[in-house]
Image (cartoon, rainbow, N blue to C red):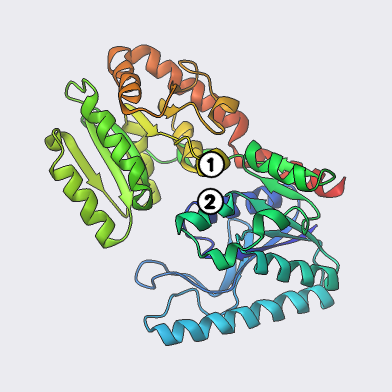
Amino acid sequence: MEIIYLGCNGYPFGMAQVERQGLIAKSLVGAGCKVTIINAVGPHDRNKVQLKTKGEWNGVDYIYTSGSPYRPTYPLFRKFLKIVGLIGEFTYIFKRGIFSKIDVAILSTHSFWTLKYYYFLSRILRFKIVPDYVEYSSVLSSSGQVSSKKLLFFDKYVPVYADYAICISKFLFDKMRIINPQLSILRIPPVCDIEKIDHIEDSKGQLPYFLYCGSAFYMEVVDFVLEAYNLSDSRGFYLYLIVNGKPHELARLNELVKNHPKTNTIKTYADLSFAELIKFYKQAAALLIPLRPTIQDEARFPHKIGEYTATGRPVITTNFGEIPAYFRNRHNALIAEKYIPAIFAREMEFIIDNPEQSESIGKEGRLTCERFFDYKIYGEKIVELINN
């Protein structure tokens, strides 16, 4: 089966969504498919990433149709390369569809117009469309995270323009089924590469600490974690915050930490490599990921839950969204019943008071990861979805 991945931005290196694209593509290669990830433009810094314009990574072919994997310094040149990339993408898809073969295109986008454009191409070139639906776009629009123009009608029409669909949560599954009851949909939660994580050796001699990893865009969640830590009887346990963001966001974080009652036991980190990140995960007393009682968090399923559980460390979260579908409190995770800092703090104290049981919970979380979050188990399921 010949599969192209569209709407990508940065494979093989990038944030959570790029990781998901790559691992799903890799799972399809393992199922016997030929997969090409198409990046219209390159977002990379040439001082940090050495990458060819066209190549292969972990068995997955990729191409940057703008002619460069790097982000130009000058704004005018960036706009020029964006136009070149879009034209190059169209040319590549059209030639491949006419002279070679495309069976399926998996889409990673929140834009209605992009969805419609790819659907139009698919009807001409006779390939199937499979959106990977991971966020409720209407909420992203209202939050200002993504331009509302790109999200116009997306949630309403993504089930209409899909031949099949992948989604990350029951919330999104149900939304699509209401609009298109006949659509074949496969739920794929966050996926991770367990073997890759296992091969990273953990660090030794660290102080006991809780760890939160996230984006400064979700500063509300960072505030929540800081408040929970303040309310907990931490007894010498540190709090490590690994937060990436814009300079002004990180400046605000540093100010919050500076003024925190437990500032001397809080450490902040940013821009870590994947290996460095996993080392921190593996030595943590517990890994924190509170989900908020919002539509956005009900619809999404954070990528790092897969990586967290793969390390075998206990995870502390909240009883919302997809969590009840995969986790039971004090069995394979610690789950605060409500999104309240004081309740979350009690779960942190459980880790301190019950080290042996906490280790057992972490091991059960790892088994959950192997059962549900290992990318390898989904390639054949996607092929089966498309063939039925």
Instruction: Describe the element under mark 1 as helix, strand or loop.
Output: helix
Q: Amino acid at mark 1?
A: Ile
In depth, the one of 6 and 63 nearer the eye is 6
- Residue 245, percent across and down? 33, 56
Q: Is residue 109 above or below residue 184?
A: below
* Total numbered badges shown on the rendered structure: 2
User: Do callouts 1 and 2 mark residues in contact (Cβ within 8 Å)?
Assistant: yes
Characterize the local packing of mark 2: few (<14), some (14-19) or many (20 or more) Cα atoms within 10 angstroms.
some
Residue 320 seen? yes
Indicate the quadrant where residue 64 lies. bottom right
User: At 36% from the left edge and 27% from the top edge, which residue is drawn?
Assistant: 340
For residue 139, which numbered disc appears in the image?
2
Work out whether 9 lies above or below 290: below
Residue 128: percent from the left, percent from the top? Answer: 81, 60
Q: Secondary structure at mark 2?
A: helix
Q: Residue at x 52, y 73 (%)?
A: 52
Q: Position of residue 211 (x, y in %)?
A: 31, 35
- The first of marks 1 and 2 along the sequence is 2
The amino acid on which the numbered mark 2 sits, given as a three-letter code, is: Val
Using residue 33 as the reference point, say whether residue 11 is left or right of it.
Answer: left
- Residue found at the far front of this picture: 142
Question: Which residue lies at the image location 30% right of the left edge and 23% below the top edge?
Answer: 342
> The C terminus lies in which quarter of the figure?
top right
As displayed, is residue 296 above or below residue 343?
below
- The residue lying toward the viewer, choosing from 297 and 123, is 297
Residue with the mark numbered 1: 295
- What whole-number distance in Å separates the C-alpha atoms at marks 1 and 2? 7 Å
Decide which of 316, 285 is in the foreground and name it.
316
Q: Which mark is residue 366?
A: none
